[in-house]
Amino acid sequence: MNLDLYTQAMQRFQTLFVRAQSLDIPEPAAMSLATVTDTGQPCVRTVLLKAVDTRGFVFYTNKHSGKGTQLRHNPHAALCFFWQSLMEQVLVEGRVEDVSGAEADTYWATRARVSQIGAWASLQSESLSERAELEKRFAEFEKKFSGQPVPRPSYWSGFRLRPNMIEFWSSRPGRLHERERYSRHGDATWNHTWVYP
Ligand SMILES: Cc1cc2nc3c(=O)[nH]c(=O)nc-3n(C[C@H](O)[C@H](O)[C@H](O)COP(=O)(O)O)c2cc1C
């Protein structure tokens, strides 16, 4: 694989992400995640980037959720980061794969206990008749795991999006913004192109 261009793109993302994290802005790790249903309906929602390296972009979720079901049927997905303070956007397209159980366990252990119990209590994306039902489930799991570590539910884990396209958009005067696209062709080659804004 022409790793130079890919490595360059990932390093460029890391540099931007570090800059975004150094600013006093809410949720610099927030990204829009787009998936597609069986009928071809695109769906989008915000998730948090929890790890990134040359293998790709990792987020965690309930695998029984809407997005989890969609990704199980169709692993193609896209991400959009927008850091308003920087006026920079990064788009990523690719395929997701499961993170290993060991990797999910390591991240799970860093989560606050309330978030761990919340992951058991929330039947993410299923209908909820009233808020009290969620609170009742939370209290039940709090009791169930009282005095012991909260185990990671088998359905709660991470996806890693392996990019086949990364595009950087930078604001420039007169709406002559810069767009640079890095894209994978086949298994071995990455190309770099400029794109009209
Ligand atoms: C700032 C922010 C961060 C979020 N982070 C996550 C996340 O990392 N994982 C997750 O499953 N949901 C996260 N959510 C909730 C999702 O946007 C979404 O409501 C939920 O995952 C259910 O989506 P689905 O029904 O499409 O699966 C976040 C929401 C916001 C606003």
Image: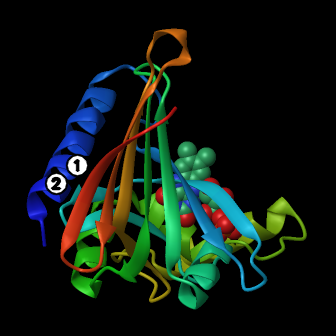
Position of residue 50 measured from the top left corner of the image (x, y, whole percent) = 34, 56
x 20%, y 36%: residue = 15
Please give left or right for residue 171 compared with residue 15 in the image: right
Position of residue 135 measured from the top left corner of the image (x, y, whole percent) = 72, 64
Position of residue 107 measured from the top left corner of the image (x, y, whole percent) = 28, 66
Tag 1–tag 2 contact (CB < 8 Å): yes
Q: Quadrant of residue 24?
A: top left
Label 2 sits on residue: 5
In three-dimensional space, the C-alpha distance between marks 1 and 2, rounded to whole angstroms, equals: 6 Å
x 35%, y 77%: residue = 148
Please give left or right for residue 18 compared with residue 36 in the image: left
x 42%, y 76%: residue = 95
Would you place residue 71 above or below residue 108 in this image? Answer: below
Label 1 sits on residue: 9
Q: Amino acid at mark 2?
A: Leu
Q: Quarter for ligand 1?
A: bottom right
Answer few, some or many: residues within 10 Å of disc 2's Cα (few below 14, many 20 plus, some between 14 and 19).
some
Please give left or right for residue 191 compared with residue 81 in the image: left
Residue 25 or residue 186, whichever sits in front: 186
Would you place residue 186 above or below residue 42 in this image? Answer: below
Dot 2 falls on a residue whose secondary structure is helix
Residue 176 or residue 130, whichever sits in front: 176
The furthest residue to the top: 173
Residue 22 or residue 178, whichever sits in front: 178
Residue 143 visible here: yes
Answer few, some or many: residues within 10 Å of disc 1's Cα (few below 14, many 20 plus, some between 14 and 19).
many
